[in-house]
Amino acid sequence: MDKATFRKYGHQLVDWIADYFEGVDEYPVKSRVKPGEIKASLPGSPPSRGEDMEDIWQDFQKIILPGITHWQHPGWFAYFPANNSPASVLGELLSAGLGAQCMIWATSPAAEELEEVVLDWLRQMLGLPEGLKGVIQDTASTATLVALLTAREVATNFSSNDRGIQESLKIYSSQETHSSIEKGMKIAGYGRENLRYIATDEDYALRPDKLEEAIQEDIKAGEKPACVVATIGTTSSTAIDPLPEIGEICDRYDIWLHVDAAFAGTAALLEEKRDLLSGAEYLDSFVFNPHKWMLTNFDCSAYFVRDPELLIRTLAINPEYLKTARDEEVNNYRDWGIQLGRRFRALKLWFVIRDYGVEGIKNIIRKHIELAEEFAGWIQESEELELLAPVSTSLVCFRWNDGITSREELNRINEEMLKRINESGEVYLTHTKLDDKYTIRLAIGQRTTGKKQVERAWEIIERAAAEVTAG
Ligand SMILES: Cc1ncc(COP(=O)(O)O)c(C=O)c1O
């Protein structure tokens, strides 16, 4: 592609994205293509000669776009959000344009130093303890894997890296914990049977008394507790595990404490939500995802550790070809994570924080929380909809329930209701199960979601409930 063509399509694509931001609500939120439809429209083998950019662009619009589910749609209430923003897209574009490999300081000093600075900004923004050091991981799943690897080495006095795990190590997390803990345990060699799911209370938060019971049982049986993973904002219902009590237990038994605040961590930007992270003084590692709620496009997870030396000792590699004269003076982030090559992700984060300012980001988060509280109020006032979990940040869990229908039938009705809600194409909600109850989740957090979309979601939900339960 010559410079003129690059320039032409570069401008055209940025124009298209600018219009997309504004007009994304004209698409159905959830793609309506059937399995295999996109593949059937694509050639099975690659072109042997270069094709015209215009043809590629036309095919993007004709073939690819219908298969896109629009996460940036203001009617996005599914899973958790995965926000971008104009500033983050520009940062991402620039990072792609620079194409810098940021594996060690020497391969782009600005990338390494900006990451250090921006991560410390984030630490301050969330009110995390001074002294925590941050690094960007691709996802919370990777950050949790890194935490599990470090906890493994600490628990075995750094011998597992050399000899493999020789003893039975236990990990503790609530029944509501994210699946990335189990996946991390498989990868890190703990074996998933060594994950102890701790019972939760009526609000789906981990019970510290049950945690301590499990730890004592394991110690008595000759097992070694290696790590507790506490969740601030579980995936199903944003339950908040009690960090001060859990931290105190970890402290007493000398167990690594990893905190997974992938979604809800962003709420701690608000002074009025800071108590979400009370007990943070106990944590050994912590992750939250700016790529969920904090306006920074996927992928960008902020991972903090109390003692970077433990992390580095766990993951360090030092082949001759990567040695530099500056290694003693600088951070080489290749040793802070799994991959060697690293993208310049700090750039988009820097763009976002500077473009919005901390107050600008907080205003958006605060708006979402207020909308969720208002929506939860409507549910509480409704005769046939019920809240199924406390609203700790901006996720509302609810279902239709007339109080006389059996549980199985209620599950069927709510599943059918959700199907109809999503058929509207105007909103997209997803479900979970809480205590085996089919639960509809309304996750408010898309950057452009406002009162209008939440009111519309309410109308669609009420209409679906009436249709499904008519007669
Ligand atoms: C609590 C929690 N932890 C971890 C994750 C995984 O996040 P990622 O996709 O960044 O790995 C999620 C995803 O929603 C989550 O809700």
Image (tube, rainbow, N blue to C red):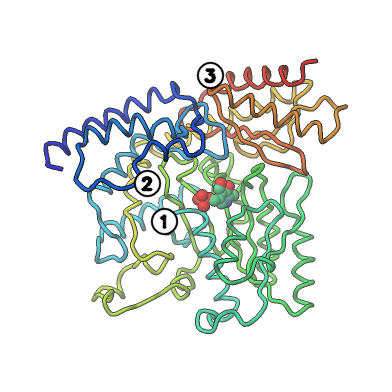
- Quadrant housing the N terminus: top left
Q: What is the distance, in whole Å, between disc 2 and disc 3 at their CAs?
A: 29 Å
Marker disc for residue 349 = 2
Q: Position of residue 174 (x, y in %)?
A: 70, 56
Q: What is the distance, in whole Å, between disc 1 and disc 2 at their CAs?
A: 10 Å
Q: Residue at x 50, y 28 (%)?
A: 29
Find out whether the residues at labels 1 and 2 contact each other: C-beta distance under 8 Å: yes
Quick one: SS at disc 3? helix
The kind of residue on which mark 2 rests is Leu
- Figure check: 303 above or below 370: below
Marker disc for residue 408 = none
Q: What is the distance, in whole Å, between disc 1 and disc 3 at their CAs?
A: 35 Å
Q: Quadrant of residue 348?
A: top left
Query: Which tag is nearer the camera, tag 2 or tag 3?
Result: 3
Q: Position of residue 79 (x, y in %)?
A: 57, 39
- Figure check: 206 above or below 379: below
Quick one: SS at disc 2? helix
Q: Residue at x 72, y 59 (%)?
A: 197
Marker disc for residue 452 = 3
* Residue position marked by numbered label 1 in the rendering: 136
Tell me: 420 left or right of 137. right
Quick one: SS at disc 1? strand
